[in-house]
Amino acid sequence: MAGQLREYRRRIKSVQSTKKITKAMELIAASRIAKARARVAASRPYAEEITRVIEAVASQTTVSHPLTTEHPQAVRAAVVVITSDRGLAGGYSSNALKRTNELVELLRSEGKEITLHVVGRKGVGYFRFRGRAIDGEYTGFSEQPTYADAKSVADALIASFVADAADGGVDEIHVVHTEYLSALTQSPVARRLLPMVLTETDEPPVHGPLPQYEFEPSAEAVLDALLPRYVESRLYAAMLESAASESAARQRAMKSATDNAEELVRTYTRQANRARQDAITQEISEIVGGANALASAS
């Protein structure tokens, strides 16, 4: 009985130590959510405005530019997937990877060859384990991405987008990231980054009449200058959304782990108390039995 009681106490101490770690990680993730959401809100106006400008420029010129022109026979597509560098975030990375596999299957069914660009160690490990070729690996910044991190990914994508097919160029660029909806809801989404999807409509523009542009030196040069900024801003916005989603998923996972640890401590405490009572009862029974035996002998 004494050995069993020691074992329960050892387990209680071990679970309490784990609980301290998960509680600390929960608090850290909660503090990062607010900062990540603020960064998302700060980056959104720039991304929306540069998209609006490109749409306005594209609507006033008939220039055929890779930024807005559909490839009639697209044969290669680049897929960027944003995952986490660390674990303990519930299904955050696995959901993004599942959405990536669905997108890859869809593109392959259309007869397109896929090139993978993976952000985050979890995604890199996932594809390496399955023997999948990775054209670009970017790690070390999933929780706190900077614009420079987005630019490093965008430079590689733009280089492949403007390159010829013979040199390994791609006709489309897609990005898979996790969209932050609320502290309880994050949803993996897949969007085409390039060529831009321009929709024709008869409704008046939301921000009022579109301005008239005069291009200097040319419309092609303007779009060439806007192309890197557009890709960088969109990737940066996706990384910030994913960072907020990762922190929210980690907070939720660590809260669940902390609650489970508390329940284990209560369970082990009850079992330890029961073992202690059994030991006391056994000792009393032995004492009473011994006293009775002595009384009978005398």
Image: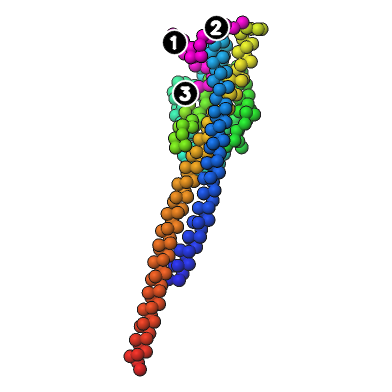
SS state under label 1: loop
**Which numbered mark, 2 or 1, is in the foreground of this view?**
1
Q: Nearer the viewer, residue 238 or 140?
A: 238
- Give the mark, 2 or 3, whose residue is nearer the N terminus: 2
Q: How is the image coloured?
A: rainbow
Separation of marks 2 and 1 at Cα, in angstroms: 17 Å
Q: Nearer the viewer, residue 35 or 141?
A: 35
Q: Nearer the viewer, residue 108 or 42?
A: 42
Residue 277 lies in quadrant:
bottom left
- The reply to whether residue 42 is visible in this rendering is yes
SS state under label 2: loop
Q: Residue 111's x, y, as percent? A: 47, 21
Q: Is residue 145 magenta?
A: no
SS state under label 3: helix
- Residue type at mark 1 is Glu
Q: Residue 247's x, y, as percent? A: 52, 39
Residue at image mark 2: 60
Residue at point 35% right, 94% down? Answer: 298
Badge 2: residue crowd in 10 Å (few <14, some 14–19, many ≥20): some
- Residue type at mark 3 is Leu
Q: Residue furthest right?
A: 217
Name the magenta segment's main secondary structure.
Answer: loop
Kindly indicate whether the residue at mark 3 contacts the one at mark 2 (C-beta within 8 angstroms): no
Residue at image mark 1: 203
Residue at image mark 3: 107
Residue 137 lies in quadrant:
top right
Give the side of residue 45 with respect to residue 274, left or right.
right
Separation of marks 2 and 3 at Cα, in angstroms: 31 Å
Q: Residue 27's x, y, as percent? A: 53, 45
- Give the mark, 2 or 1, whose residue is nearer the N terminus: 2
Question: Looking at the picture, does residue 162 appear above or below residue 3?
Answer: above
Magenta-highlighted residues: 191-214
